[in-house]
Image: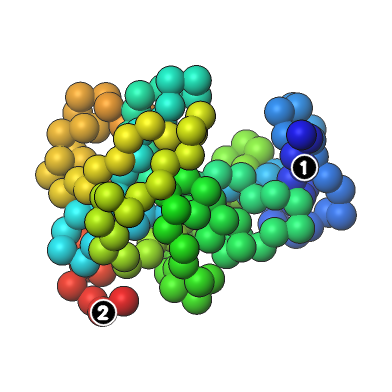
Amino acid sequence: MEEFNDVYDKDRNLTGRLHLRGTPWKPGEYGLVVCVWVYDGKGNILLTRRAPEKSFAGTWENSGGAAKAGETSLQAIARELFEETGIRAGEEEFQLLDRGRDSFTHYDYYCLKRDTPLGDIVLLPGETDDVQWASFSKIHRLIAQKKICRVIAGQFLRQEQTLRRLQDTKP
């Protein structure tokens, strides 16, 4: 089934145009990608492993993906998290950590405080094939071993201090 994304300009304004996923972006067109760090409040971050058929297969990451046409950033992150882990969260539960932009994408980075038992996680076949709670030090080891892809590793390192401050706050 074809999937479409909204097209934004460099200043993050909707253009009213749609982009067919999997086709090249035109110069000056941007999509929206959302990511979330789920943390348990005790110093652990939820990581999922990318399935063998995905790019960066076998590497660990946080949940996230592209916003579909018509979705807000918060709608997209709630959907992506549920699709990839089975965790349901209301839009009001996500805390925006940061925003970014590269050549063709605007990024929104969120966190969600949720202590979910691993047995309750429902992985999406074809997307993820394993899950773990990882301490900050374990994430650093995974980065050093190149078991977290470069993009996700950079994201974690930029947001680590904020995540550490949040680990002791109430949900």
Q: Write the residue at 53% across / 71% down.
A: 91
116 left or right of 42 in image: right
Q: How far across and down, in percent of the image, does residue 29 sit?
A: 76, 41
- The residue pinned by badge 1 equals 4
Q: Quadrant of the N terminus?
A: top right
Q: Residues within 10 Å of mark 2 (few under 14, many from 20)?
A: few
Sooner in the amino-acid sequence: mark 2 or mark 1: 1
Task: Classify mark 2: helix, strand or loop.
Answer: loop
Q: Residue farthest to the right?
A: 16
Q: Name the residue nearer the viewer: 169 or 118.
A: 118
> Within the image, what quadrant is residue 154 found in?
top left
Contact? badges 2 and 1 (CB < 8 Å)? no
Q: Residues within 10 Å of mark 1 (few under 14, many from 20)?
A: some
Is 84 above or below relative to 144? below
- The residue pinned by badge 2 equals 170
Q: Amino acid at mark 1?
A: Phe
- The answer to whether residue 91 is visible is yes
Q: How far across and down, in percent of the image, does residue 135 sit?
A: 16, 49
131 left or right of 31 in image: left
Q: How far across and down, in percent of the image, does residue 87 sit?
A: 42, 58
Q: Residue farthest to the left?
A: 137
Q: Amino acid at mark 2?
A: Lys
Q: Find the distance from the CA under tag 2 to the CA under tag 1.
A: 37 Å
